Image: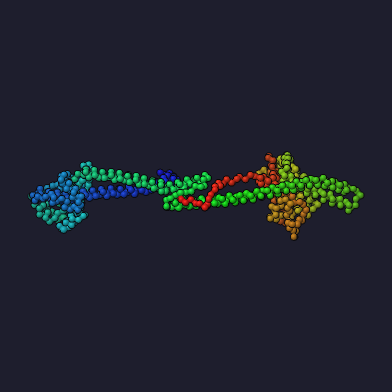
C-alpha cells in the first residue's frame, strides 16, 4: 500500500472508522502475540514432560538390561516409576505408558570388540562422539553422580516426523562398579580397557507421539479459536465504545450545528455523559448564545447605520441638486454674457479703428478690447467645463495631419511668445494621418501653449514636439523654462480653479502672480481622457515644466465621459442589498443546559 493510500485510509476518513482501524491495528498484534507465547509455552511443557518420562524409562531400561544379562534380582515396576521425576503429571503419564506398553528402548554402545549395539544413523554417531568427549573429562564417581543428578544432565530428544515417535537419548558413563563387570570376558559387553568416565552406553527410548501430537494440534486449534473469538469480541466492544461513547456525542454536536446554520437558532446541544463531551456541549451552547447576542447588537447597529446612510444620501441629493443648479446657473450666465461681451469687443474694435482718436483714447479702447477677450476666454473655459461635467461634450473624429495641426497652433502662439522674447521651437517626426477630434487636440495644445507662455519669463524657451511611441500612440510634449511646479503641487494643478505658487519671494497659494481661472489644465486633462488618453507632468521648481499628452492615433471607440455629479448621484441612488439576518425572538434569561 502506498503512502497516499495509507494516508487516505487512516487520515482522511471519519472518526469512527479511524478509531476502529487504529485500535484494531494495535490490539491484533498484542492478542496474537499473547496467544502465540502461550502456545509456545504449552509446547515446551509437553516436551519437558516427555523428557521426564524419557529419564524414567532410561532407568527402567538399564535395570531391565542388567536383569536380562546378569540375572539381577527382579525389581517391581512400582519401585522404578519416574525415580527422578518431580512432576505429578510426568508420573501419571509414565504410569499410563507402562500400563499400555506403548514404548521401547535400545542400548547403543560405542565401538567395542564384539560390535554390540553400535549406532546405525549419523545423528546417533554424532551423539556418541559428543558424549565420549564429555566423558573424558570425568575421572571420579562423584563427578559422574553430580552430572547425573543435576538438572544439566546430558540428553537429547527429537520427534521423528515420519513415524510420529519421540526419541529420547541419554548417555551412561562408567563408574568404579562398572569396570569390574565389563572387564569379565564372559560378559557380552566386554571392554578390557574400560576406565572411569568412559561412555559406556547411550540409551534410546522411543515413545508413541501420535497422542501427544494430536493433543498439541487440538490445543493449537483451541488457542486459534480463542484468539479469533477474543479479537472479535474486542473489536465488537471497541465498536460499541467508539460508536456510543465518542462518535455519538460528536454527531449530535454536528447535527445541532447544521440545524443552527439552516436557521433554527433555538437548537441546543443536549449531552449528559459527565465527561469532556458534556463540557464541550455546554461550551457550544454558551458560544451560540453569545453569537446570538452579538447578532442582535449588530442588527441594531446596522439599523442605526442605515438611518445615518439615508440621512447622508438625502443631504448628498440636496447638495447634488444645488451643485447642478450652480452649474446650470454658470452655464446660463456665461452664455448670456457672451452676447453683450462680443458687442463690447466689436465696438472696441470700431473705436480703435477711428483715425482721429487721441493716444489716450486709443489706449482706452485697446484696454477694453483686451479685457473683453480675457473675459471671453474665461467664459469659454467655464462653458467647456460645464459641458464636460454634464457629459454633453461630443467627440467628432476625422483624419488629419497631426504635424500640420501642431505647427499651425505654434504659429498662432508665436505673436504672444514674441512679445516676451520667448523662443518657440517645434519638432515633428514623419507621422501618418491620425483619426482623432482635431478641434479638441487644437484646444489642448492651445491651453498648454498659453500656460507655457504665461509662466515663462522673458527671454525663455518653449519646445513643442510630436512623436509616435513604441506602442503606436501619439506623444505630444510641451516643455518650457518657466517657473516650474513643486512636487507637492503637481497633482493639485489639474484640479479646478487651482494654480501653483510662483518662485517669487513670498509667493503662496492664496495669492496669484498670474491671471486666469485655473481651469486650463483641468480642461486639458478631461479632454485627454475624452479622447482615450491622458496627460503627465514632469517639473522642477525654478527650472521649468514638461507636459506630455498621450493619445491613440486612431480613436476606434468613442469614450463616454460621465459627469462626476451624475456618478455621485448614481452611487447615492444605488439600491443597497438588504442584510438577511435571522431575527429569532430569544429569551436570554433562560438557558438550555446540556
**Viewer-side residue, 518 vs 311:** 311
Left or right? Give the position of 445 relative to 350.
Answer: left
**Viewer-side residue, 132 vs 312:** 312
Left or right? Give the position of 478 relative to 248.
Answer: right
Q: What's the residue at 68%, 55% (across, down)?
A: 487
Q: Position of residue 519 (x, y in %)?
A: 74, 50
Extreme-bottom residue of the structure? 505
Q: Position of residue 315 (x, y in %)?
A: 68, 49
- On-image quarter of the N terminus: top left
**Viewer-side residue, 506 vs 430:** 506
Q: What's the residue at 69%, 51% (across, down)?
A: 537
Left or right? Give the position of 563 relative to 198.
Answer: right
Q: What's the residue at 34%, 44% (across, down)?
A: 232
Q: Position of residue 72 (x, y in %)?
A: 9, 50
Count of numbered badges drawn on the protein: 0
Q: What's the residue at 73%, 53% (across, down)?
A: 499
**Viewer-side residue, 384 vs 352:** 384
Left or right? Give the position of 252 relative to 583.
Answer: left
Amino acid at each position: 500500500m502506498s503512502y497516499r493510500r495509507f494516508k487516505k485510509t487512516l487520515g482522511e476518513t471519519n472518526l469512527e472508522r479511524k478509531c476502529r482501524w487504529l485500535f484494531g491495528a494495535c490490539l491484533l498484534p498484542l492478542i496474537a502475540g499473547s496467544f502465540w507465547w502461550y502456545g509456545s509455552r504449552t509446547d515446551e511443557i509437553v516436551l519437558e514432560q516427555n523428557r521426564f518420562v524419557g529419564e524414567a524409562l532410561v532407568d527402567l531400561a538399564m535395570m531391565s538390561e542388567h536383569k536380562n544379562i546378569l540375572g539381577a534380582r527382579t525389581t517391581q515396576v512400582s519401585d522404578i516409576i519416574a525415580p527422578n521425576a518431580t512432576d505429578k503429571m510426568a508420573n501419571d503419564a509414565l504410569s499410563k505408558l507402562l500400563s499400555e506398553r506403548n514404548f521401547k528402548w535400545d542400548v547403543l554402545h560405542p565401538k567395542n570388540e564384539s560390535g554390540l549395539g553400535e549406532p546405525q544413523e549419523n545423528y546417533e554417531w554424532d551423539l556418541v562422539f559428543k558424549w565420549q568427549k564429555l566423558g573424558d573429562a570425568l575421572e571420579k564417581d562423584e563427578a559422574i553422580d553430580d552430572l547425573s543428578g543435576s538438572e544439566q544432565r546430558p540428553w537429547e530428544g527429537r520427534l521423528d516426523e515420519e513415524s510420529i515417535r519421540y526419541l529420547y537419548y541419554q548417555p551412561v558413563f562408567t563408574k568404579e562398579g562398572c569396570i569390574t563387570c565389563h572387564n569379565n570376558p564372559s560378559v557380552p559387553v566386554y571392554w578390557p580397557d574400560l576406565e572411569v568416565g568412559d561412555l559406556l552406553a547411550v540409551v534410546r527410548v522411543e515413545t508413541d507421539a501420535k497422542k501427544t501430537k494430536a493433543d498439541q494440534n487440538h490445543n493449537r486449534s483451541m488457542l486459534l479459536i480463542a484468539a479469533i473469538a477474543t479479537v472479535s469480541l474486542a473489536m465488537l466492544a471497541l465498536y460499541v465504545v467508539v460508536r456510543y461513547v465518542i462518535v455519538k456525542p460528536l454527531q449530535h454536536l454536528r447535527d445541532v450545528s447544521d440545524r443552527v446554520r439552516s436557521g433554527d437558532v433555538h437548537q441546543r446541544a443536549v449531552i449528559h455523559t459527565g465527561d469532556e463531551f458534556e463540557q464541550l456541549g455546554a461550551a457550544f451552547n454558551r458560544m451560540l448564545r453569545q453569537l446570538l447576542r452579538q447578532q442582535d447588537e449588530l442588527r441594531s447597529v446596522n439599523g442605526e447605520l442605515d438611518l445615518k446612510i439615508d440621512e447622508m444620501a438625502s443631504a448628498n441629493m440636496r447638495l447634488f441638486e444645488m451643485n447642478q443648479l450652480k452649474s446650470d446657473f454658470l452655464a446660463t450666465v456665461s452664455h448670456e454674457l457672451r452676447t453683450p461681451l462680443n458687442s463690447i469687443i466689436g465696438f472696441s474694435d470700431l473705436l480703435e479703428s477711428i483715425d482721429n482718436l487721441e493716444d489716450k483714447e486709443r489706449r482706452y479702447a485697446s484696454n477694453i478690447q483686451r479685457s473683453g477677450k480675457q473675459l471671453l476666454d474665461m467664459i469659454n473655459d467655464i462653458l467647456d467645463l460645464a459641458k464636460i461635467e454634464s457629459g454633453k461634450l461630443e467627440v467628432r473624429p476625422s483624419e488629419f495631419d497631426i504635424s500640420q495641426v501642431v505647427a499651425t497652433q505654434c504659429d498662432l502662439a508665436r505673436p504672444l511668445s514674441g512679445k516676451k522674447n520667448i523662443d518657440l521651437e517645434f519638432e515633428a517626426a514623419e507621422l501618418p494621418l491620425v483619426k482623432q477630434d482635431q478641434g479638441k487636440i487644437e484646444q489642448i495644445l492651445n491651453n498648454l501653449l498659453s500656460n507655457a507662455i504665461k509662466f515663462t519669463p522673458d527671454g525663455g524657451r518653449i519646445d513643442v514636439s510630436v512623436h509616435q511611441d513604441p506602442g503606436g500612440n501619439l506623444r505630444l510634449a510641451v516643455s518650457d523654462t518657466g517657473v516650474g511646479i513643486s512636487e507637492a503641487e503637481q497633482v493639485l494643478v489639474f484640479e479646478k480653479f487651482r494654480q501653483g505658487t510662483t518662485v517669487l519671494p513670498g509667493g503662496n497659494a492664496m495669492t496669484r502672480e498670474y491671471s486666469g481661472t485655473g481651469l486650463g489644465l483641468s480642461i486639458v486633462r478631461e479632454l485627454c481622457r475624452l479622447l482615450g488618453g491622458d496627460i503627465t507632468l514632469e517639473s522642477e521648481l525654478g527650472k521649468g515644466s514638461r507636459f506630455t499628452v498621450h493619445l491613440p492615433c486612431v480613436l476606434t471607440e468613442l469614450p463616454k465621459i460621465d459627469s462626476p455629479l451624475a456618478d455621485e448621484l448614481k452611487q447615492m441612488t444605488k439600491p443597497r442589498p438588504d442584510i438577511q439576518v435571522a431575527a429569532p425572538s430569544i429569551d436570554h434569561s433562560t438557558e438550555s443546559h446540556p
